[in-house]
Image (tube, rainbow, N blue to C red):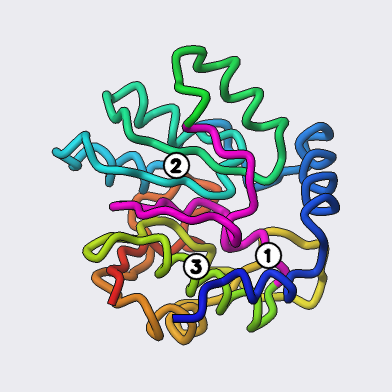
Amino acid sequence: MIYLRVFVLLLNMSNKQEEAYWSQRYRESRTGWDIGHISTPLKTYFDQLEDKTIKILIPGAGNAYEAEYLWQQGFRNVFVMDIARLPLYEFKKRNPNFPKKQLLFTDFFKHSGQYDLIIEQTFFCSFVPTAENRNAYVQQMAHLLAPRGKLVGVWFDIPLTGDMEKRPFGGDKALYLSYFETMLAPVLFERCYNSIAPRQGNELFGIFRKR
């Protein structure tokens, strides 16, 4: 496999530009997809997990309410990743006992490791929606998943517009599968039945295994 470091060049901004861009958005609270708490579909999924030793990564975690909930439920092998320092700093303030070494201030596309579970929550939708960026995402996810690892999360089922500042960027089930199925086998990918009221009918819940 050709690892994703080759594809970093395809992203539209340098790491420093990305960090500055997202830090500014967090400072100004311009993260319209941030609902202020864990989303219902992911909470429901987490509540049925029995093995609390699994290694979990949440990339592009932002305020990381999912990691906060997992930590509160006794999952101790959770890693929170973001390219901006500010949300990681705020997360640590809210969760002072969370291990600093598990807060990853880094570029997802340069990260190495193996994870049993990777959580998707408004990360995919933050990239400029080029085929190069979306293929890079899928390849890096496959690279980071352990042999029987799973990518689990929520994707926006909303029209993909041409406005490059209109985040979150969307798509539909067929479009997402056209990228994912090259390296990730869908176990489940359906319309969410338990979205919060403002997102009813606009979310897909997916479970994908590494091929």
Residue 150 in the magenta stretch? The answer is no
Look at mark 1 in the image and give the residue it sits on.
127
Q: Is residue 38 above or below residue 166?
A: above
Numbered mark located on residue 71 in the image: none
Tell me residue 75's x, y (percent): 29, 30
N-terminal label among 2 and 1: 2
Tell me residue 24's x, y (percent): 84, 40
Tell me residue 60's x, y (percent): 59, 48
Q: What is the three-letter code of the residue carrying label 2?
A: Ser
Q: Which residue is more in the foreground, 120 or 30?
A: 120
Answer whether labels 1 and 3 touch (C-beta < 8 Å).
no
Residue 119 in the magenta stretch? The answer is yes
- Where disc 2 sits, the SS reads loop
Which numbered disc, 1 or 3, marks the residue closer to the eye?
Answer: 3
Q: What is the three-letter code of the residue carrying label 3?
A: Gln
- Where disc 1 sits, the SS reads loop
Q: Is residue 29 above or below residue 14?
A: above
Look at mark 3 in the image and give the residue it sits on.
140
- Where disc 3 sits, the SS reads helix
Q: What is the three-letter code of the residue carrying label 1?
A: Phe
- Which portion, as a residue range, is magenta? 102-128
**Residue occupying image coordinates x 27% and y 24%:** 74
Q: Is residue 95 above or below residue 39?
A: above
Which numbered disc, 2 or 3, marks the residue closer to the eye?
Answer: 3
Question: Quick check: 28 left or right of 81?
Answer: right
**Residue occupying image coordinates x 56% and y 53%:** 122
